[in-house]
Amino acid sequence: MSILKQLINSVDQHPASILVVRQQTEQRLPSHQHDKAQLLLVFGGIAYLQTDEKDFYIPSNHYIWIPKNYPHNLMFNTQDLYIINIYFPGKNSGEFYNELGIYPVSKLLSEMLSFSEKWHGDYFKGSWEFDFLTTLRNVLSKENLKKFSIQLPTTDDQRLQDIVGQLRTRLNEELTLEGVAKQWGMSVRSLTRLFQTKLHITFIQYVKMLRIIRAMELIKDSDLTMTEIAYEIGYSNISAFSNNFHQLTNMRPTEFKTMSRV
């Protein structure tokens, strides 16, 4: 039996149970889905979750809620990443539980997770652990937290894939719509239309997200100062870098550094 089938079978083996998994089992799996909704919590690094439409970036001390039967694939490339998966049975009820979303781990949720830190395996209705985990699930929608908003849309357009692939390697340069269009033998209007029709995002928005994602990786994995990181990803103004980082992550770079190295 393949690892993928083993995972799906373990999640859906007991349709009415709440399953807690603390093993890093999904990082090499292809896209898959299961009959239970999934609460995936990330600590100590950055996880990357792929869907058919977008790539999601989940920083340390954040969680992602994945509705039931939602195709996805989790990846990460750091050894100090710690992940907790909690799989919930039943129908998705309410807007929060029907949408994929990334949110910060609140103090309340952190304390509930700490209380249940040794739990692992299936828990069934009638047990106090099942009731506790159900309460944890219900708390999520009541906190009214702001979504983490870095979501890179994907495309099967080969030319656009080549363009954005090159952008990733040139983030320390001045990247303008006019300059990139000229390099690729396109008009500004054609490149603008390509981003809007294939990615449903502007060129400037896409580059901004690429830069902040790279900044997150450098903050986590290097000893560069914030000024050096800002320069490395194409910012000459540390204030502009900090403001854009906050706009997309709801945190200042220094806050993210503290959280990612806990």
Image (cartoon, rainbow, N blue to C red):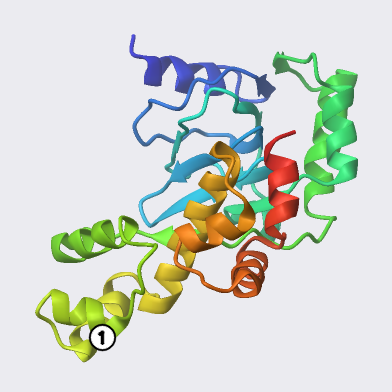
Rendering coords of residue 194 (x, y %): 23, 77
Which amino acid lies under the numbered mark 1 shown in the image of this protein? Glu
State the quadrant of the C terminus: top right
| Residue 232 visible in the current orientation | yes
Q: How many labels does the image show?
A: 1
| Residue 193 visible in the current orientation | no
Identify which residue is drawn at 65% across, 67% down.
242
Residue denoted by label 1: 178
Rendering coords of residue 202 (x, y %): 39, 79
Frontmost residue, 11 versus 100: 100
Seen in the picture, residue 123 relative to 99 is either above or below; the reply is above
The answer to whether residue 114 is left or right of residue 7 is: right
Rendering coords of residue 172 (x, y %): 39, 63
Seen in the picture, residue 197 relative to 149 is either above or below; the reply is below
Quadrant of the rendered structure where residue 180 is?
Answer: bottom left
Identify which residue is drawn at 57% across, 46% down.
224
Frontmost residue, 28 versus 32: 28
Identify which residue is drawn at 47% across, 19% down.
7
The answer to whether residue 1 is left or right of residue 242 is: left
State the quadrant of the N terminus: top left
Badge 1 marks a residue whose secondary structure is: helix
Frontmost residue, 225 versus 177: 225
Quadrant of the rendered structure where residue 185 is?
Answer: bottom left
Taking the view exactly as shown, the residue that stands out farthest to the left is 185
The answer to whether residue 166 is left or right of residue 43 is: left
Rendering coords of residue 37 (x, y %): 60, 39
- Crowd around label 1: few <14 · some 14–19 · many ≥20 (10 Å): some
Seen in the picture, residue 141 relative to 31 is either above or below; the reply is below
Frontmost residue, 46 versus 37: 46
